[in-house]
Image (spheres, grey):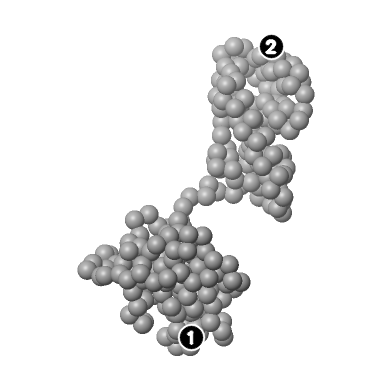
Amino acid sequence: MAETWFDASKYFLGDMFDITMNCIFRNTVQDCAADGKAGVLHRQSELMREAHPPQAYDALMNLLSSHDQARALQVFGWHDDTRDAAVIALAKQRLRLAVLFQMIFLGSPSVYDGDEVGVTGGDDPYNRATYPWADPDAPLFVDDQMVVLARRPGNTSALTATNNAATPQTVTLALRDLPAGFPLDDLRDDLRDVLGDVQGGWADLGQCARAALRGARALWAGAGQRSVVQRARARPGGRDRPEGGVLVAPMLP
């Protein structure tokens, strides 16, 4: 298998290459998906078909992205600093069109790891971002002062929040971000022995203050605990949470 950026048909005479990355396909399909002319796509496809032996043409590795050039989404307009929702939506739509053609065209569709879930990235090395595997140890929330973690040592589950700021901080988590199977019905405030309950899509860790043990908070769940329902509080800024349901664990003031 070879990697060539040009018409490599002269190497498919039976004494050199068996297959190569089809960069001509990449360039042509990207241009067409980004409002280029379909006629050009057809002519380039016919050029490749006429230049290659059938057994090679039918096996060319048709790619849209690679580690050598910007990812397809970047080419289609979604850059690292893009914030315009319409631009992002158009880039995604162009990628879907390109992938559709990639899957139905003769040859071997070759998906660059991460393209299938919309990884972006410009020229090398930014196009080499790894696949965004879910990290079970990744923080549920992190900023300049706060870190919130979910931990499951043995049969115990815990949500922990640490704060190095001089003032109390409030953290609200979307429950969908918690690990699968996390026991949301039996969470207890470890320092104040306050029970919480879940009624909707949010977990409120209340306030976490800095000072000795008050700089860390833990909610933990174990067998045999009961839970009580507490009323949801408003979001910072005065807006209510959707559904009004939260798991409330007030932090020390």
Q: Which residue is mark 2?
A: 50
Residue at image point 69% right, 28% down: 29
Q: Give the residue type at disc 2.
A: Glu
In this rendering, is residue 216 above or below 72? below
Q: Amino acid at mark 1?
A: Pro
Mark found first going from the N terminus, 2 or 1: 2
Residue 211's spot in the image, x, y percent?
A: 48, 88
Asked whether the residues under the numbered discs 2 and 1 touch, taking CB atoms below 8 Å apart as contact, a structural biologist would say no
Residue placed at 69% from the left, 48% from the top?
A: 85
Q: Is residue 117 left or right of residue 27?
A: left
Along the horizontal axis of the image, is 161 left or right of 25? left
Q: Nearer the viewer, residue 225 or 136?
A: 225
Please name the residue shown 62% across and 12% down the image: 53
Q: Nearer the viewer, residue 23 or 103?
A: 103
Q: What residue sits 45% from the left and 84% below the top?
A: 252
| Side (left or right) of 32 relative to 239 | right
